[in-house]
Amino acid sequence: MYKDILVHIPTERPLHPAIEGSVSLAAKFNAHLDAVAVGYVATSAAYVMEGGAAVAAVFELERERAVERAEAALEVFKTEAANAGISYTCHALGAIPVDAAGSLGEMARLHDLSIVLQPDPAQGTFDNDVPSEILFQAGGPVLFLPYTFRGTFKANRIGICWDGSRVAARAMRDAAPFLARAEEIVIISVNETDTVAGEASADSLARHLGRRGLSTRTVGLTATRADIQPIILSLAADESLDLLVMGGYGHSRLQERVLGGVTRAMLEAMTVPTLMSH
């Protein structure tokens, strides 16, 4: 059960999708919602002047202004959360992006679920980098809301993107509270005969979920690697799915976080809320 939820409220992008989605979800699960907003301090602020005291003074001024931006975003959240009658806490941070990502990752590790907004490649902002960093660092499920999301979050019809991998299995387990409440569950398998061992097949998953009392339907698809993400989203539209569940693929290369191809494509062109686990 999701009882302690973290949401990242953007300060440099539209914030209502994250607020509306997280508040309505917290109300549905009767969960506590921790909202964190980050005002970003430009890394160049620490190098404006030579001399320790001068540098510290410039950086502190920039940090204070950054915290004010975070607090302004959280004021909008507070209004919506209070109107919904949910339990909530707010955290306003002012930090350079790398420190902010580390702090958010640490916070996410102690929450049942983290909620973030889908990155928008059309906008150059640090708010675009935070969601994937949380995915890498959280050690748990991350719910990505499309930046076009509006209204009340629901997960009546769920699609599980299944390839038999460790991360897909992790995502499936992390989505258990959603699956238990779902009206319909569709297991989506792409190129299964080429990629999935028999013991971890879509049919095996269906039997496993059946033992939990969950009724499922399996849809097998065939696609080239470049077409996997579009064909999944096409099926999601045809099936009127409210939520997709999938593994968040990627790895760390030195200091760089590298997302897998399908994961990156999904984040770039997401049309329905998607729960990912890494």
Image (cartoon, rainbow, N blue to C red):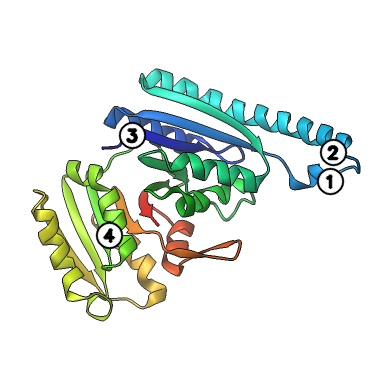
At label 4, counting other C-alpha atoms closer than 10 Å, the crowd grade (few under 14, some 14-19, many 20 or more) is many
Give the labeled residue for mark 4. Answer: 169
At label 2, counting other C-alpha atoms closer than 10 Å, the crowd grade (few under 14, some 14-19, many 20 or more) is some
Whichever of callouts 3 and 2 sits on the residue coming sooner in the sequence is: 3
**Of helix, strand and loop, which one carries label 4?**
helix
Q: Which mark is residue 47?
A: 1
> With respect to residue 77, does 105 lie above or below?
below
Task: Tell me which amino acid carries mark 4.
Answer: Ala
Give the labeled residue for mark 3. Answer: 25
Task: Tell me which amino acid carries mark 2.
Answer: Val
Q: Which mark is residue 55?
A: 2
Q: CA distance from mark 2 to mark 1?
A: 7 Å
| Residue 154, horizontal then vertical, whole percent | 28, 39
- Name which residue lies at 62% across and 40% down: 12
Q: Is residue 240 visible?
A: no
Task: Tell me which amino acid carries mark 3.
Answer: Leu
Q: Which marked residue is nearer to the observer: mark 3 or mark 1? A: 1
